[in-house]
Amino acid sequence: LDKQIKADAEKRLIKEAGERRPQIIMDAASFDFGRLSKKLGKVSKIFKLSNKGNLPLIIKNVKTSCPCATVSLNVNKKKTPYFGTEGAPKNWQIEIKPGGNGELELMIDLKSEHVKSGKLIREVSVFSNDPVYPEVTAKVEAEVNE
């Protein structure tokens, strides 16, 4: 997408959403594990989420891009179950208060039949009530060998 078009659309959305809104922020949207052996089994990466807005941020769903990956969200010392490609159950949600934060744990099972030797890229999608960014994604990558 053209960067100028994206920037203009973002400005317009922010203006339309107004000052009073939830605002999801993910500290780093990608992480590279480097070289990994399938023998390691499960590896995980924690991504920090925060609500920089002034209304409660409601996370409505989290899901992964592959059956080899699961994701859990920890907010206020409450850790959710791990969700996979199907995402969270219907009507599930968790709230992050204004100024609050949470941790998103993306776990990859390297021993899964869905993990082959070579380049691995997996994503987790987070769906919320942020009117500007209703979906944000985090990505992990690795070079996997036997």
Image: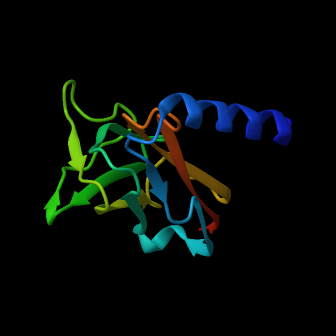
Q: Residue visible at 54% across and 28% down?
A: 16
Q: Is residue 47 visible?
A: yes
Q: Residue visible at 45% across and 42% down?
A: 19
The quadrant holding residue 141 is: bottom right
Foreground: 38 or 54?
54
User: Which quarter of the rendered picture does the N terminus lie within?
Assistant: top right
- Residue 90 lies, with reference to residue 57, above or below; the image says above
Foreground: 141 or 42?
141
Q: Farthest residue toward the top?
A: 90
Foreground: 22 or 1?
22
Q: Classify residue 116 as left or right of residue 25.
A: right
Residue 117 screen position, x and y as percent: 65, 59
Q: Residue visible at 47% across and 56% down?
A: 25
Residue 29 screen position, x and y as percent: 57, 58
Foreground: 14 or 36?
14
- Residue 24 lies, with reference to residue 2, above or below; the image says below
Q: Classify residue 114 as left or right of residue 74.
A: right
Residue 127 screen position, x and y as percent: 40, 36
User: Which quarter of the rendered picture does the C terminus lie within?
Assistant: bottom right
Q: Classify residue 134 as left or right of residue 99.
A: right
Please count the marks in the image: 0
Q: Residue visible at 53% across and 46% down?
A: 137
- Residue 34 lies, with reference to residue 129, above or below; the image says below
Q: Is residue 106 visible?
A: no
Residue 101 screen position, x and y as percent: 31, 62
